[in-house]
Image (cartoon, helix red, strand yellow):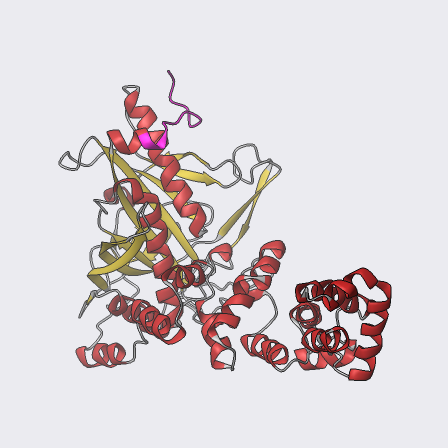
Amino acid sequence: MSTTTAEVMDYDDVVARFDPVLGLEVHVELNTASKMFCGCSTEFGAEPNTQVCPVCLGLPGSLPVVNARAVESAVRIGLALNCSIASWCRFARKNYFYPDQPKNYQISQYDEPIAHDGWAEVEVPDDEGVLRTYRIDIERAHMEEDTGKSLHVGGSTGRIHGADHSLLDYNRSGVPLIEIVTRPIEGAGKYAPQVARAYVSMLRDLLRSLGVSDVRMEQGSLRCDANVSLRPSPDAPLGTRTETKNVNSLRSVERAVRFEMTRQAAVLADGGRVKQETRHWQETSGTTSPGRSKEQAEEYRYFPDPDLVPVAPSAAWVEELRASLPEAPAVRLRRVSAEWGFSEAELRDVVAAGALDLVEATVAAGASPQSARKWWLGELARRANNDGVELDALGVTPAQVAELQGLVDAGTINDKLAREVLEGVLAGEGSPTAVVKSRGLAVVSDDGALGAAVDEAIAANPAVADKIRAGKVQAAGALIGAVMKSMGGKADAGRVRELVLERLT
């Protein structure tokens, strides 16, 4: 049996024979207005190579200056992850050559990170639906700069192999990054893929609440490198790990860990050895492919950057930042769960959809928790999925959703008409109230118009009318449906029912 990436072991067999160990490295692009060591803009989506200068291109004679806001964000992240904050730390040069790193070195932190020795907890449901808590130990969170971006042209996969040529965009080079590195995560067993996903999800929520990053995984501002190794039992030495690079969705984090477990298990079961290397995640096939051999720290020839002074956060400043931290996501979840009366499953669905902020803002704008949840996890989630965008990028605000539900609650429109109103809002036609007015979508409650429609429905459906006269009131639904159809869904269904029964009972 060979050991190609296509050969995997059944997952149940994997967890029966091996103990998985994870290590997760999450790179977070900060949302500062300028780069880590220069004044260039960090705005996403600009024309290639328009946001560069001698400093971020590493031209001779240029000198870097530390972005103070980035340092503040790093401290806030460290505190939120229960880390100790260094009273003194330095930047180092990590030396390597890649085309997307114009200086041939990356300014990072090596043995002196700004934050270290922290922890976080995540909850994952087991097969019976019972939540299990896993503690994730954080080794470090350090500051560094991002690299540029390579675009490989002419191949079928978008990777360098098979491409005709490559293009380089240095706009991202120098954007502030925080790298959060866990210690080995042991004891997850069969739930290791779900634990990995839950951890990255928790980080995304935490970083969003801190306001330090937009954490848009699809744009690369939150990326996960997933390290996976297998060993025969929990008391055995750690196995050889692979590092799947730059996984950029929660679903893919879970799938990548699961695939690597099944791939490595097939290698080991065949008597082979897992190669320590980086691997690339293939979204379409749900597999990983080999990258490069994984370097050791000494191969990067770290040394302190001679152009940058040390960073020394004062104890008073650190405590001031600690006092300014927002409500922790776990605490917030317990609070909103109690306030909204959601079941555990309902709240979990909101969190999984990335809709917690949106639901909370919609409730704050006047909607009930259940109606806010209904819209964001129902019609709006469907539209976001169809459009391939995040919920908060749809083009409708929580205030507009609350206004839409208010129109339903007031009887101005019904649920069916509300979906048409929503189409108008998403099309840029204005507020829900404006769309109702411009499209003439208000429910008809006038007894004259409704009465005439009811009389027509009774005349057209004499058999149904006779059933109602005979006491079968539930048959009224057929007449109500006929009236709604004749009036284009704009009739007040409750009033139509009353009129039907007044005439026939």
What residue range appears in magenta? Answer: 1-12
Q: How many marks?
A: 0
Residue 490, percent from left and from top: 75, 73
> Residue 293 lies in what quarter of the image?
top left
Q: Nearer the viewer, residue 348 or 111?
A: 348
Magenta: main secondary structure equals loop
Classify 376 as above or below 327: above
Picture quarter with the C terminus = bottom right
Classify 428 as above or below 294: below
> Residue 428 lies in what quarter of the image?
bottom right
Q: In this view, which residue lies farthest toward the top?
A: 1
Residue 486, percent from left and from top: 82, 67
Q: Is residue 284 left or right of residue 104?
A: right
Q: Nearer the viewer, residue 30 or 268?
A: 268
Q: Nearer the viewer, residue 343 or 116?
A: 343
Magenta span contains residue 2: yes
Q: Residue at x 31, y 28 (%)?
A: 13
Residue 180, percent from left and from top: 30, 57
Picture quarter with the N terminus = top left
Magenta span contains residue 194: no
Q: Nearer the viewer, residue 143 or 226?
A: 226
- Decide if residue 104 is in sight here: yes
Q: In this view, which residue lies farthest toward the front?
A: 470
Residue 131, percent from left and from top: 29, 54
